[in-house]
Image: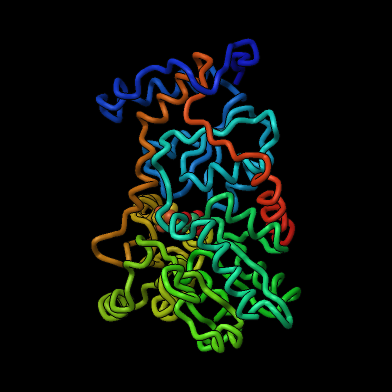
Amino acid sequence: MNGLLLEDLPVQVTGESCSLDHYLVQPDETMDGSIRAAREKLGTQAVVLGHHYQRDEVIRFADFTGDSYKLAKAAAQTDAKYLIFCGVHFMAETADILGRPWQQVILPDLNAGCSMADMAEIGQVEDCWESLERLRVTAGDGILPLTYMNSAADIKAFCGERGGLVCTSSSAREAFEWAFQRAGKILFLPDQHLGRNTAFALGIALNEMVVWDPYQLNGGVEPERLRAARVILWKGHCSVHQRFLPEHVDRVRREEPGMQVLVHPECRWEVCQKADALGSTERIIELIEKAPEGSSFAVGTEIHLVNRLARQFAPRGKRVITLDESGCLCTTMYRISPQHLAWTLENLVDGRVVNRIQVDSERKRWARVALNRMLEIKH
Ligand code: 13P
Ligand code: SF4
């Protein structure tokens, strides 16, 4: 596809953009033509990255789809000047951190955040670390901070600067192993469930883990217990995945014999223990893809992905249903609409960069260290 040469256009970070309101009153399906035409004009200068939780009306325009690990790798490897990230804020920040200086990352709706990422603020994490030092929890074999990708850039930088790293749900096991080769303890931010599920799978007993509540003195944990723990889990969670309960697995076992239960490791430990397999969004898709015809699955993850898998695999004789009958929606992922995508693309065609995500150089430096450690340990 031959694109317009945007180098020749007066691109600016802010400026008079076409009104978003004008787009928001148009029906979804009327956006397809505008998106296609803008993509055609932009050619190879712009790539669209789409997380699996995006709605169909958006993800069908993505050049790259994937879980957060795969998208971070794609962002680090593309040569496009503009990266339009159809996902949430921390994913766009990651693309900016891993991208090259001349690349620009755009998040079509700046309100597309992640409630879990918001559960760990840098001031709270610094206070926690100070308390761990004061209580001599960091003494002995030492402690490394490890953060889930679902965190702000300053948390990633905090980990990088202290010898730690970032992981996604598809690299958490390798990240824990890497950290335990270098220290006796891990502070895991911000998802207690992914941390607990990963540590447990590595043979760490539940009583060797404690939960740090940032709203309580010393995290609400006795100093003795903090010193004895091998994993300190930040008290954060995903409100979408925490809705799946062990009862949902029990119901599937009762009503759908033979059905396999696949869940995302952001689900509670009790749910993960009852499931047949855990995996990132990409891994869940892969498991269904590789299963023989006639297989059936109850999937515990975001509803847009589950519904898409149900439609995609039905013609291939595989049945996919949601684990929780009502289905769980990630409202922030849903904020990226075809209208927002058309608006960002048409502005780009006109030489305007709207909704750019930029991480400042100091945070970028250490966050990149933490992200590169992640990319190095998983191939
Ligand atoms: P994945 O990395 O599995 O896509 O998960 C990202 C996420 O936010 C899940 O809630
Ligand atoms: Fe964040 Fe949960 Fe949405 Fe994933 S599903 S982006 S963890 S709120």
Q: Position of residue 95 (x, y in %)?
A: 60, 42
- In the orientation shown, which residue stands out farthest toward the front? 134
Q: Is residue 379 visible?
A: no
Rendered residue at 31%/58% (across/down): 328
Query: Dividing the image into 4 quarters, which one contains the C terminus?
Result: bottom right
Rendered residue at 63%/27% (across/down): 81
Quadrant hosting residue 136? bottom right
Q: Position of residue 89 (x, y in %)?
A: 48, 44
- The colour scheme of the drawn protein is rainbow
**Residue 244 vs residue 74: left or right?**
left
Rendered residue at 51%/18% (across/down): 352
Front-lying residue, 80 or 307: 80
Rendered residue at 44%/72% (across/down): 213
Q: Position of residue 140 (x, y in %)?
A: 73, 83
Query: Dividing the image into 4 quarters, which one contains the N terminus?
Result: top right
**Residue 236 vs residue 78: left or right?**
left
If the picture is divided into quarters, which one holds ligand 2?
Answer: bottom left
Front-lying residue, 195 or 349: 195
- Above or below, 365 against 34 in this view is below
- Above or below, 77 against 375 in this view is above
Quadrant hosting residue 19? top left
Q: Is residue 167 visible?
A: yes
Q: Position of residue 209 (x, y in %)?
A: 53, 82
- Above or below, 11 against 96 in this view is above
